[in-house]
Image: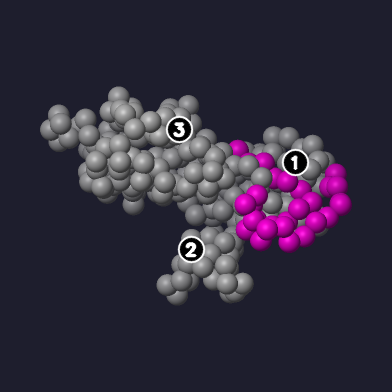
Amino acid sequence: MDAQTDLKEGVLLVNKPQGRTSFSLIRTLRKLTGIKKIGHAGTLDPFATGVMVMLIGRNYTKLSDKLIFDDKEYLAEVSLGVSTDTYDCDGKVVARSKKKPKAEEIEKVIAQFQGAIEQEPPMFSAKKVKGKKLYELARQGITIERKKALVQVHTTLLDYTYPLLRFHVTCSKGTYIRSIAHRMGDMLSCGAHLAKLQRTRSGAFRLEECIDGTLLDAPDFDITPFLRSHGEEE
């Protein structure tokens, strides 16, 4: 790879702002760099924040298939007593409960999310079934049977002050944290949804290494000093 390519291509670690889609970062970076070949190593929902591994240039987008399989870490905040159709704060409220789970109930539930677990993809997700994205069906009011997938999780309770439950989770590719929140609500018989989510690590890349995603909104922002090489020799 020549020196000029080194300056234009690489891995850019971005702390995705809340309210932004993952694809909006790609569009913004295309405008900033003039490079069309830009990818990532895993999306985040619009309400979520944290580590987005952006892959700039042809030599790096090809790493996506490998990096996307890396495990990830999150800080999650679950709101108990309110269930939504999307399992998160962006959805429509579908049920409410006044039940206030006790601390020992919370601890028992957290203990169930350790190691290998089976997880059903939420209807409001981009997962495809027979060529159709699930969220496209969900928006039409259609619910279909989804095949459960085996994922690896390790969950640690951080704080519980009703109605908010905070936990840290390390998980394998394809884990839906909002599905964990929804399932916790079911197990506690009070309902729940994911109120906040922050990805703190994606593979070898950590939040403290990321640049603030709002910096990319400046039309003259230079990403060059923040680009890094990764995996070219592998």
Residue extending farthest to the left is 2
Task: Point out the tag, 1 or 2, that comes first from the N-terminus.
Answer: 2
Amino acid at the residue labelled 1? Leu
Position of 101 with respect to 115 (left or right) is right
In the picture of the structure, the residue carrying the numbered disc 1 is: 164
Q: Residue at x 33, y 28 (%)?
A: 221
Residue 194 is inside the magenta segment: no
Q: Residue at x 58, y 68 (%)?
A: 138
- What is the secondary structure assignment of the residue under circle 2? loop
- What is the secondary structure assignment of the residue under circle 1? strand
Residue 97 is inside the magenta segment: yes
In the picture of the structure, the residue carrying the numbered disc 3 is: 214
Magenta-highlighted residues: 73-102
Q: Nearer the viewer, mark 2 or mark 3?
A: 3
In the picture of the structure, the residue carrying the numbered disc 2 is: 127
Position of 96 with respect to 184 (left or right) is right
Counting the numbered discs, the total is 3
- The image shows residue 4 at horizontal and vertical percentages of 15, 31
- The image shows residue 36 at horizontal and vertical percentages of 26, 47
What whole-number distance in Å separates the C-alpha atoms at marks 3 and 1? 28 Å
